[in-house]
Amino acid sequence: MTALDGRRAAVRIAVVGAGGVGGYFGARLAAAGGPGETVLVARGRHLEAIRARGLRVRSPLGDVTVPSEAVVATPREVGHADLVIVAVKLWDTEEAARQVLPLAEAGAAVLSLQNGVDKDDVMRRVLPPRSLLGGVSYISAAIGEPGVVEHHAPLQKLVFGEFDGSASKRVSELLQRCLDAGIDAAAHPDIERVIWEKFVFLVGLSAATAAVRQPIGVVRSDPGARSLLHDVMREAAEVGRARGVDLDPGFADERLAFCDSLPAAMTASMYRDLVQGNRLELPWLSGAVARLGREAGVPVPRNKAVADILSPYVAGAPAPVE
């Protein structure tokens, strides 16, 4: 296999953020590649545990262990990379972009697998626009304990592509690398629409399960909560269409029907962060719909209400009032 830049015999991939998403896909890529072909960037207690025992992924598709030498503390320690996958939380996007700037300026492609529709705009303000690929991930995975990533269900898929729709060499080579690693992957000519399609669904699942504080089975079975779920997705889709994204007018209805097929116990990561007292990605989900809707002149009262209701929890569980 040639490299993404055509100069090396193997694609060298750096994964910035070895949590649930980055840890899972990074581990699969590392297990399938040769020594040094995949480097993962981690931090804190997770990094300490990986340095002691390696990164362990527990998955219904088979467990994987990545040796400690494949993990570093900062992008500066990566050296050369042909592709950088960014999988940090949304509030760390700009800082991650600054950290990978030297790699991008040296020719690396940069692919964000983060949630939301703001991520690539933030990166464009820091990185060479030509370096960016668009992409999304479909997976339920999280850090179970430091050094361990838990993959909760068989679903694990990546979709990515060039923002101009071209069939580039770097996309085709990344696709082959993913397939060789056993990752369900696809290239798409309209990646902006794919990003928005995931965003609409994720906003709905996150808003409904977090605001109701119940899994999707309860939400979809209660008329009021089901209406909230539908309307949150409908508003997000309307904002996307107002911004020129080719979303079908019945897309929210289709996603609601899809929600009926999900496991009843399913929740969004924002729900889990809420109940665990962690920081929330709310400003980049319903909060983003509220902001973008205001900018586009599209009424989004349901998303505005969710953003307001959950606002006290954005920075984590609020301190008790004396």
Image (spheres, grey):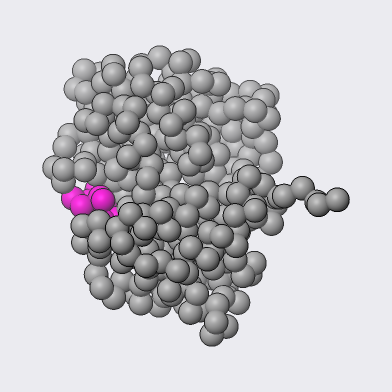
Q: Is residue 61 left or right of residue 107?
A: right
**Highlighted range, magenta:** 186-194
Q: Give the residue drawn at x 36%, y 59%.
A: 293
**Residue 22, percent from left and from top:** 48, 39
Instruction: Give the residue at the far bottom of this rendering.
Output: 223
Tell me residue 120's x, y (percent).
33, 40
Residue at the spot x=47%, y=58% of the render?
A: 286
Please say if 228 is above or below 273.
Answer: below
**Image position of 153 with respect to 301: above or below:** above
x and y, in percent, of residue 97 in the image: 40, 28
Q: Residue furthest left?
A: 166
Query: Does residue 190 appear anywhere in the picture?
Result: yes
Considering the image in quadrants, where does the N terminus appear? Answer: top left
User: 223 or 107, which is in the foreground?
Assistant: 223
Task: Residue at the far right: name it.
Answer: 322
Q: Nearer the viewer, residue 39 or 32?
A: 39
User: Residue drawn 65% across and 53% down?
Assistant: 312
Left or right of residue 14, residue 179 in this image: left
Q: Nearer the viewer, residue 182 or 160?
A: 160
- Can residue 240 be seen in the rendering of this structure? no
Q: Observer-nearest residue: 280 or 41?
A: 280
Residue at 36 percent across and 49 percent down: it is 117
Picture coordinates of residue 69, whole percent (x, y): 55, 20
Find out whether residue 251 is within the magenta segment: no
